[in-house]
Image (spheres, helix red, strand yellow):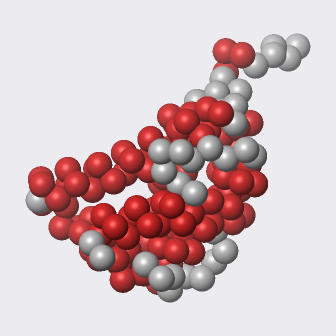
Amino acid sequence: MTSADHEAASRVKCGVGAAFSPSSVDDFVDALCQWFAYATGPNRVLTTARLVLFIEGSHNAGLREALTRGRAAMEATAAPAFAELGAPHPRAASVAIAACVEGLTLHNIARHDDADPRPTFDLVVKAALACVPMNARPVIT
């Protein structure tokens, strides 16, 4: 199985991909947790290799471009889901959750940190949905 096959399988397995459309915060967080469990469990070797490539990407433009496409795909999947759930800034929310997922994955792989990602994913998703732009906040006198 190629890395593209593994990626496609993980998206299908975890409900993440072009058709990702969670109906609630809990559905969104469940999908993130499922992806995390897959990436750090059965797909751990490939995930570790991907993280090693991040360092190589610092001085290899072709590799950096491929890594950028992967991150863009993650954000492109999350942004519409955040929009459907009512996030006022779905693009910013997708960047935040992608950074969160990558950071927790890195620490799980590199430090064998077995912390449950659910509370963190839940916090970030809920914060993204609760955000109210400064110019839309009521004036308190």
Specify whether 6 is left or right of 11: left
Specify whether 60 is left or right of 115: left
Q: Residue furthest bottom?
A: 112
Specify whether 25 is left or right of 39: right
In front of the other: 33 or 8 = 8
In front of the other: 133 or 139 = 133
The picture places residue 117, in percent across and down from the top left corner, at 63, 68
- The quarter in which the N terminus is drawn is bottom left
Total labels: the figure holds 0
The picture places residue 57, in percent across and down from the top left corner, at 19, 61
Q: Residue at x 48, y 51 (%)?
A: 17
Specify whether 130 is left or right of 107: right
Answer whether residue 47 is visible to the viewer in this image.
Answer: yes
Q: Residue furthest right?
A: 141
Say if 62 sits above or below 52 in the image: above
Q: Residue at x 65, y 33 (%)?
A: 84
The picture places residue 27, in percent across and down from the top left corner, at 71, 54
Say if 100 sits above or below 35 in the image: above
Answer whether residue 126 is visible to the viewer in this image.
Answer: no
The picture places residue 129, in percent across and down from the top left corner, at 70, 38
Q: Quadrant of residue 54?
A: bottom left
In front of the other: 132 or 43 = 43
Q: Residue at x 12, y 60 (%)?
A: 59
Q: Residue at x 36, y 83 (%)?
A: 45
- The quarter in which the C terminus is drawn is top right
Q: Quadrant of residue 47?
A: bottom left
